[in-house]
Amino acid sequence: MGHESSEILLAEDNSAIQVLLHEVFEDEGYTVTCCSSAAEAIETLQQHTPALVISDMHMEHIGAGLQLLRQLRQQARTASTPAIVYSADSLLLRTLKPQIEALNAVAVEKPFNIDGLVMLARSLIRLQEREAP
């Protein structure tokens, strides 16, 4: 794969999780661009139009993932890009669920099943490709 439509933007400040997810998704044939903060991911979105955004909710601050989602939806180029956000804080995810869903994203609780995350990512990308003009 390796073309821009198969790029995943991964926003994760934990280097061990970032390396793991990078390897897993590259093994699946995706190009993965890694960012260590929501601010870095927002900057990266200026030059990239990924097929999917995957983000931790807790990075430089608790709502960093939500901030990234808002920016993603505000740009015409990425307004319909599928997104997955995750957190080990199940209370945070439940509290923010209405906002996450309003931003057309999927919330996943950590620890997550890697195979399940890959299947979710693949299905979101395929669905987006079918809906694209």
Image (cartoon, rainbow, N blue to C red):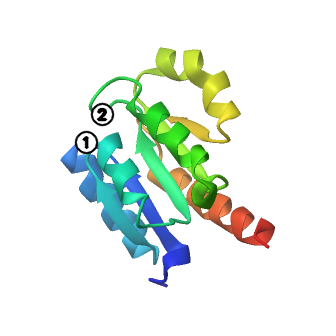
Residue 33 lies, with reference to residue 67, above or below; the image says below
- Count numbered badges in the picture: 2
Residue in view at x 29 percent, y 53 percent: 35
Q: Which residue occupies the extreme left position in the image?
A: 15
As rendered, which of 125 and 37 lies closer to the eye? Answer: 37
Regarding residue 51, the answer to whether it shows in the image is: yes
Amino acid identity at mark 2 = Met
Q: Residue at x 31, y 58 (%)?
A: 34
Q: Quadrant of residue 110?
A: top left
- Identified at 63% across, 56% down, the residue is 76
Say which amino acid is labelled 1: Asp
Along the horizontal axis of the image, is 108 left or right of 31?
right
Disc on the earlier residue, 2 or 1: 1
Above or below residue 29? Residue 80 is above
Where is residue 74? Give x, y as percent. 59, 45
Q: Which residue is mark 1?
A: 13
Q: Callout 2 environment at 10 Å: few (<14), some (14 to 19), or many (20+)?
A: some
Mark seen at residue 59: 2
